[in-house]
Image: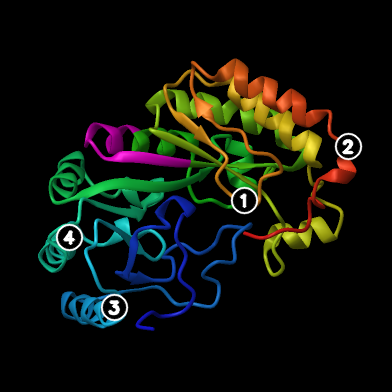
Amino acid sequence: MPYTGKVYRPPSEARSLILQATTGCPYNRCNFCSMYSDQDFSIKSLAGFKEHIQAVKQFHRGPVESVFLADGNTIIIKTEQLLEFLETIREEFPKVERITSYGSARYVNKKSAEELKSLREAGLARTHTGMESGDADTLELINKGTTPEEIIAAGKKVKEAGIELSQYYLVGVGGQDLSEQHAVNSAKVLNHFDPEFIRLRTFIPIEGTKLHELYQKGKFKLLNAHQALAETRILIENLDVSSQLLSDHISNHWDINGRLPDDREEMLAEIEKASRVELSQFRDPAAGHL
């Protein structure tokens, strides 16, 4: 296949054609993540990107309506070049209706509001952003490389540009010590820019990462399923948004889905129901798939 290394995409992009504009992640220092640990970051040239598309088209036939631009943080590509990539996609796939990418606050904030608007006009419809947390202590623990203030600034810029924002919250990544403030302060950050989507992921320690090392040494206490559900309850109770909240990942202990604020009580009732299930019926908090 015409791809370099492991290729990741959000579950919601399952029907999207994946095109690799970059390889790896330009930051690649988060203490919880090993996705691109074995790859150096690089950006394809326009000629290289066009060659990649032609190679992909040998395997994919038929109309393409949605494209996901991989790998990590493709929003880092200089705007002029990224506009050329978007134009190329529209030329090669004339029926494409939606183009999406990963883009953390760290790299969104390197672009002006005008640049983001030009990207939206060129076809970038949605940015998937791994906020993970809006709590300063938790962000420091996981070495995310951003602050709550930077996450808010990026979220506002993306929304003002007319780009849909799919924001990710990592349940339990603050451990037992930071669980409540992780949830409360993350809700406060999300309330500032009201993303279209808030997607829940539950932290699982991955071998080779700093948090896995801390967990093995007993310096990081994982949340069990009931504690993870309690943290999710706190998050939902403190959200003042019109977002769609989705539990669309295998890492989660229970599916909690709904539109805020209308479905808040229904989601809280579902959490209460799940909390009555014996812990032995849930997966081991340290085991699972990401």
Quarter the N terminus occupies? bottom left
Check disc 4 and give the amino acid type: Leu
Highlighted magenta segment, given as a residue range: 156-167
Q: Is residue 39 above or below residue 216?
A: below
Q: Is residue 250 magenta?
A: no
Q: Is residue 73 above or below residue 176?
A: below
The quarter holding residue 50 reads bottom left
Distance from Cα at disc 3 to Cα at disc 2: 47 Å
* Disc 1: CA contacts within 10 A as few (<14), some (14-19) or many (>=20): some
Q: Secondary structure at mark 4?
A: helix
Q: Which residue is mark 4?
A: 86
Distance from Cα at disc 4 to Cα at disc 2: 49 Å
Check disc 2 and give the amino acid type: Glu
Q: Residue drawn 21% across and 45% down?
A: 116
* Disc 4: CA contacts within 10 A as few (<14), some (14-19) or many (>=20): many
In front: mark 3 or mark 4? 3
Q: Which mark is residue 142?
A: 1
Q: Which residue is mark 2?
A: 278
Quarter the C terminus occupies? bottom right
